[in-house]
Structures are given as structure tokens and as C-alpha cells.
Image (spheres, coloured by chain):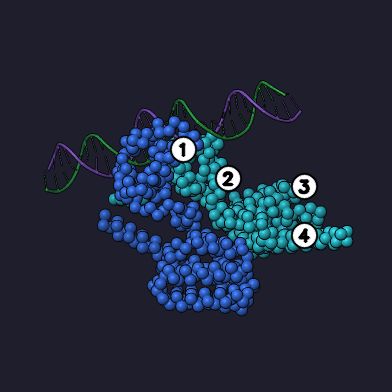
Chain colours: A blue, B cyan, C purple, D green
DNA sequence: AATATTTAAGTGGTCTTACCAAGGAAGAAG
DNA sequence: CTTCTTCCTTGGTAAGACCACTTAAATATT
């Protein structure tokens, strides 16, 4: 109906593109309800399964949301256009956080080891500056600044290892977890003693690299991630407890 | 039980999640071809439109790709995310091979450690089979078969570590260096004793994992890569010697 | 015998029809 | 007026059929 020659273009893609275009242009605003699938399919000149496949695509992009018996609506989150598969996976499968931390533990401890072995004077000067800002910013309450300084510090260590793979890998992982770090650190906000523990851990790593003690640096880095890991597991456990408490409360009110 | 939060349980979502999980865990590897939609729908116990909707979701996420008349394939986007930047760097700058081996040393020793810790009976059975073929094929002169068996063996170890990042990372690196392995091994062709050394190294790793001795496995794996590293450096040195010898010869003739 | 062409089987893409389940609104009962 | 029932609309799933494309085996050609 729509096209005499579909050629290599899938109709569902064409429909999805058309809908996406309408949403972006504003003719379909956030909160709007789409016509029923049957009517809309006729209107667009395609079959209902084809329309549904197009809707699935946009739903997985976060642009649409369907309620059984209710209708299909335009969501208000237009920012989720480009999805990094790993990013999606991380939020979808929380068990991956454990794997990710395990990987970081390996990567960063090795980076610290090599950095302690190979760091030049330039590297150490950079580390000194970054550690200074890290230490000063840890005294403030600015969470974002802390995260940025933390990332920069670890990235500098990775680059001081003078291995391009470790450098790139660390950068990739840092980019990947940048959004999740806040989750894994926010529970520290009300715990000053843990805050100080992190501070001293960074100090140990920094000094070990400065004094070219590879084993100490690797061990300290390993312990550092292990600490974050334990803190996160505790946070998760507490969250579960709160959740089940809420559930119990709900059951009583029912 | 008035209302539960995940009230809407769409089958297509369940299927999509199942597929995503399989891709993530590696049972569906990059490049793999899915069964035909008709067969796969029966296998999963759902209808074909439902399966298609699930595939649409994952396609829009970039995890799957369908070719009309050809089939549906698992993309390598998860791995490409990490590997892409290195592809041309590695081929352009041979000096990076040293970095690569260093990275492998870290990655594979950690994989061996975790595999020795976590390998299930199924994992060990797979390792047994792969080691058997590896050992038998090492007796032949078939270099390609040796490389394939070697890659499969190390990949199986990485998957036995039960860490999706380590699994994908190893797969990426293996694919990345597949063409380079021949370079790093061809010099062994005329050296039977080194051939036997590799064989015994593999045996040590294999047994350590079977007997759940993480430290032994990690150490053996580390030594294994170190051996390859030394061999390659020697080979490079010999190549340089031959090259400079040729140059000297050229100077005399000029 | 090797190569180019044809053919047939298999696969994804689309459509039609039908039925089920969840939501919502109109109407009936209190 | 409130509450409950009923029924229609809507999205979700299933099954079968046909079309378009790819692939590879079978055939014809050289």
C-alpha cells in the first residue's frame, strides 16, 4: 500500500521512522495517546503486526509505552535515543555490577603495579596534582566533583602504566560506569568514616606509585576496589531490607 | 495481593530478556546465527509474531541483525565497543604487540584463577575435550589447527571464569590477534623442544583448573604467556639480526 | 572436468484472521 | 449518590498463508 517497491527497506522500519519523526517534530507530544493499533494500522496503510513491530522498536528505545487494555502513549523521555548496549545491559542486569567490579579489580591493580614500575617524573607530577584536587574535593559535599576527581586519578594511574591497552580499557570502563558510580557511592554520603577510608586508600596507592613499590600499589588498589565492592554489597542488602520491609508494611495494610 | 509492580508480563519481553541473557552469557556468541524464526519459536514455546517482536527489540538495541532470506545473526557490538579503536592501531604499530601480550598475561591469568575457583562439571568436561584435541593436534604439523585449538582452549577457560566481561574481553582479544598468533608461533615450527614446553604448560593449567587450585592456575597461565612473550622477543631479535646481516651484505655489494 | 546457469529449498517480511486478557465506561442495583 | 456488574475497546498472542530474498545444490554449458 505505502510503497510499490519495498526493496531492501523493511516497512516496519519505515513506519518506526515515521513515528519517530512525528514524535521528534512534536506532532506527537509527550503523553499523547496513539490511535488504536487496528485504526492506526489502517491509517498508515500497513497491517497490524507490522505496526506492532514498529511500536516494539520505539518502545525499546523508550519513546513509547503500551498499557494492556489502555492504549499506547508517547513517553516524556526523548533523551534515550542512543543506547550503548553495555550501558543497557548494566542497568538491566544488576548482577553484572559484580562482574564489572571484579574486572576493575584486576585491571586497576595491574595498572597500579605497572605504574609503580614505570611512572616517569611527568607521570608523578600529574598524579601529585590530581591527588591534591582529589583530597581537597573529598572534604566538600560535592558528589559530582568527587566522582570526576576519582575518575581522573584512576585514569592517570592507568596511563602511567604505559600500556595503551590498559589505558584505553580503563577509559572505556570509566565511561561505562560513570553513570553508575553515583549509585555505588551515594550510600557513602552519610558515612564519614568510610569517606575517610577511601581517602586513606587513595593515599596509599598514590604513595606506593611515587615510591615505585609495585606490589604495594597493586595490593592497595586491589583492597580499594574490594572495599568499594563490600560497601556496594552492603548497600544492596540494605536496599533489599528496606524493600521487604515496605512489602511487609503493604501486606498489613491490605 | 492487590497489585504487584511488574503486573504487565509481556511474553515478548520475557523472550527478549532470555535472548539478551544468552547473548550476555556467551551461549550466543557474536556472529552466531539464530535458528529460523519458525523453528526457534517452537523451541521457545511461543508464536512466531511474539518471537519477531522480541527480535525487533534486540535489533533496535543493536544486539541482533536480520538479513532478508539470510537469517538473523548476533552482532559483535558488545565486543566492538571495546575493540574497535585498537584494530588499526595494532596492525599499524607492531610495537604494541608487547602491550597486547602484557594485557593477555593479566587477563588470562585472572581467568585461569577464577576458572579454577568456579568451574562447574560442565565446564571441566568441555575443557577436557578441548585439551584432548589440543594435545592431539599438537603432534601434527597443522599450524592452523593448533592455533584454533589453542584459541578454543583459552576461550573455554575464560568462559569457565563466569565473568561476562572477562569472557567477552577474551573473545575480543582472541579475534583481534587471530591473525597475529601465526606470527608469534611460526618461529616455533622448527623447535620441537619449545613445542613440548607449550604442551606441558597447557597441561599444568588444565590440571590446576580441574583440581581447583586457583593460585597454581594463575601462576601457570602467567608463565605460559611469559614464555610466549620471551619466544616472540627472541624471534624478533633473530629477525633483526637477519635483517642487519642482510643490510651489511648489501653494503658490501654496494 | 571445470565452470556458468538454473532451480529449488529455506529464511525473513508481511498480511489476514481469530481469540484472549486487561482496562474503562455505561448502565443496573443498592 | 454510591457501588457493582456488564460489555465494549484496546493491547497481547496465536496460527496460517503468501511474498521477496538468499543460498546452495543440481543442472546445463563450455
Q: Residue at x 48, y 75 (%)?
A: A134
Is label 1 on the same chain as label 3?
no
- Residue closest to the eye, B148 or A26: A26
Q: Earlier in the sequence, mark 4 or mark 3?
A: 3
Q: Which quadrant does the C terminus of chain B fall into?
A: bottom right
- Residue closest to the eye, B36 or A248: B36
Which callout, 1 or 4, points to the residue nearer the camera? 1
Cβ atoms under marks 1 and 4 closer than 8 Å: no
User: Circle 2 sits on which residue?
Assistant: B31
User: Circle 4 sits on which residue?
Assistant: B235
- Give how far apart the Cα atoms at labels 4 and 3 are: 22 Å
User: Circle 1 sits on which residue?
Assistant: A10
Is label 3 on the same chain as label 2?
yes
Q: Earlier in the sequence, mark 4 or mark 2?
A: 2
Q: Residue at x 88, y 59 (%)?
A: B253
**Looking at the rendering, which quadrant does residue B101 occupy?**
bottom right
Amino acid at each position: 500500500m505505502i510503497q510499490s517497491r519495498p526493496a531492501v527497506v523493511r516497512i516496519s522500519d519505515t513506519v518506526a521512522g515515521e513515528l519517530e519523526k512525528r514524535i521528534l517534530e512534536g506532532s506527537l507530544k509527550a503523553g499523547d495517546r496513539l490511535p488504536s493499533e487496528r485504526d492506526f494500522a489502517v491509517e498508515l496503510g500497513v497491517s497490524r503486526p507490522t505496526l506492532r513491530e514498529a511500536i516494539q522498536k520505539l518502545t525499546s528505545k523508550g519513546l513509547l509505552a503500551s498499557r494492556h487494555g489502555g492504549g499506547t502513549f508517547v513517553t516524556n523521555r526523548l533523551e534515550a535515543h542512543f543506547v550503548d548496549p553495555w550501558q543497557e545491559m548494566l542497568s538491566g542486569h544488576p548482577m553484572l555490577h559484580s562482574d564489572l567490579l571484579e574486572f576493575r579489580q584486576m585491571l586497576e591493580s595491574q595498572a597500579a603495579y605497572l605504574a609503580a614500575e614505570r611512572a616517569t617524573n611527568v607521570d608523578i607530577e600529574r598524579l601529585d596534582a590530581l591527588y591534591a584536587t582529589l583530597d581537597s574535593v573529598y572534604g566538600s559535599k560535592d558528589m559530582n566533583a568527587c566522582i570526576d576527581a576519582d575518575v581522573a586519578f584512576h585514569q592517570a594511574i592507568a596511563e602511567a602504566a604505559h600500556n595503551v591497552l590498559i589505558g584505553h580499557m580503563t577509559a572505556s570502563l570509566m565511561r561505562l560506569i560513570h553513570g553508575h558510580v553515583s549509585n555505588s557511592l551515594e550510600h557513602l554520603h552519610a558515612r564519614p568514616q568510610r569517606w575517610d577510608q577511601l581517602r586513606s586508600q587513595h593515599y596509599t596507592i598514590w604513595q606506593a606509585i611515587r615510591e615505585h613499590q609495585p606490589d604495594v600499589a597493586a595490593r592497595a588498589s586491589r583492597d580499594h576496589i574490594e572495599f568499594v565492592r563490600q560497601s556496594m554489597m552492603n548497600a544492596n542488602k540494605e536496599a533489599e531490607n528496606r524493600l521487604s520491609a515496605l512489602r511487609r508494611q503493604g501486606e498489613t495494610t491490605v
